[in-house]
Image (spheres, grey):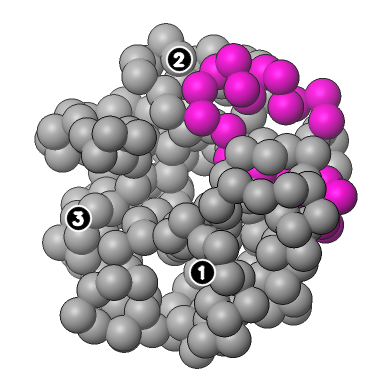
Amino acid sequence: MSRPRPRLYLVTPQLGDTASFARGLGGTLEAGDIAAILLRLEGADERTLIDRVRSVAAVVQRRDIALLLDGYPQIAIRAGADGAHLTGTEALTQALPMLKPDRIAGAGGLRSRHDAMLAAEAGADYVMFGEETGRGGRPPFAAIEERIAWWAELFELPCVGYAASLDEVAPLAQAQADFVALGDWIWTNEQAPAATVAAATERLTAVENRPR
């Protein structure tokens, strides 16, 4: 099954001051082919969380880029986000009745092929492979490539491959990830975020144009 060239999916750091972050975000969003942003927030009361989401949504959504919230499905709905990313099949299952059918429900933290299939059967809109765990651990990169290639061969549901560096972008695209996630490292990289996004987009294009 041939899949379209993957698009980028940006993951933010854990944010408290989203207003400041949003002010510098526009140039990054215009630097490449970005499908979605996953907004990760520091804990706060409900009103504060809603305000934080809305400050970023104002910049993201007017560019036809989806804004997803890491967890907090109820806040995602109240703040007008496009959906939420849930970690683990239990969190996904609990959030689905709130999010569907109007919003995106993404699934991450999937430890096995079985977990990924359960998420798909439950109604997830995408599955993510290769993201770091809460303790900073991560599967070997070869295992991530293998998992994405297996998924792309057997399932139509989109998958996101998490890139921990620019060097992982092209291999994830070659494995036929539908989206390549650039982790929060892009915001602390020596390069400006916009330059990193532009470089990642070039690598996706190079894979698409490579002779088969």
Q: For this rendering, which residue is in front, 210 or 147?
A: 147
- Alpha-carbon distance for marks 1 and 3? 17 Å
Instruction: Count up the numbered dots.
Output: 3
Alpha carbons under labels 2 and 1: distance apart = 27 Å
Image x and y of residue 75, in percent: 77, 46
Q: Amino acid at mark 2?
A: Asp
The question of residue 84 being in magenta is answered with: yes
Name which residue type carries label 3.
Glu
Kindly identify which residue carries mark 3.
168
In this orientation, which residue lies closer to the viewer: 79 or 99? 79
Q: Which residue is identified by label 2?
A: 115
Report whether 53 appears left or right of 36: right
Q: Is residue 126 visible?
A: yes
> Element under label 2?
helix
Query: SS of the residue at dot 1?
Result: strand
Few, some or many residues within 10 Å of mark 3 (<14, 14–19, 20+): some
| Sooner in the amino-acid sequence: mark 1 or mark 3 | 1
Q: Is residue 186 left or right of residue 122?
A: left
Q: Earlier in the sequence, mark 2 or mark 3?
A: 2
Give how far across and how far down residue 178 sits, in percent.
44, 49
User: What residue is at 66 percent from the left and 50 percent from the top?
Assistant: 44
Q: Which residue is mark 1?
A: 34
User: Depth check: 6 or 3 in front?
Assistant: 6
Task: Name the amino acid type tagged 1.
Answer: Ile
Residue 182, given in percent of the width and then of the height, sits at 36, 60
Is 151 part of what is drawn in magenta? no
What residue is rendered at 35% in x and 15% in y?
Answer: 112
